Image: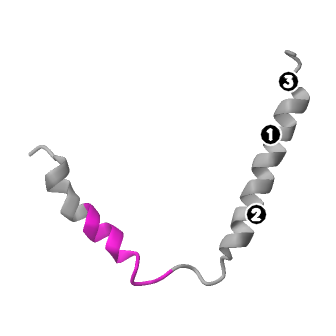
Amino acid sequence: MTMTLLSSAPALSLIASEGEEHGAYASLNPWLIGGIGLFILLLLLWGTTRFNRDR
């Protein structure tokens, strides 16, 4: 049996809806996680521009 978008959509919808029962982790602050992610990306950007000797 080949899986098509129409045959797999109900199964994927069921899997996605199961995560809503437990809720998000209360200890994870989205602003903190976003800020840390932004800081890491800016640090990588700074490192890339500092060590790029092509220009």
Question: How many numbered marks, from 0 up?
Answer: 3
Label 3 residue SS: loop
- Seen at 53% across and 79% down, the residue is 24
Question: Label 2 sits on what residue type?
Answer: Gly
Among numbered discs 2 and 1, the one appearing first in the sequence? 2
The type of residue carrying mark 1 is Leu
Q: Residue 33's spot in the image, x, y percent?
A: 70, 66
> Residue at 66% across / 82% down in the picture?
27
Instruction: Report the residue at 31% width, 68% height from top.
Output: 15
Q: Position of residue 13 (x, y in %)?
A: 27, 66
Mark 3, other Cα within 10 Å: few <14 / some 14–19 / many ≥20: few
**Where 31 falls versus 39 (above or below)?**
below
Along the polypeptide, which appears first: circle 1 or circle 3?
A: 1
Q: Which residue is mark 1?
A: 45
Coloration mode: one colour
As for residue 22 lying within the magenta part, the answer is: yes
Quadrant for the C terminus in the image: top right
Question: Is residue 18 located in the magenta-colored stretch of the structure?
Answer: yes
Q: Secondary structure at mark 1?
A: helix
The magenta segment: 12-23
Mark pair 1, 3: CA separation: 11 Å
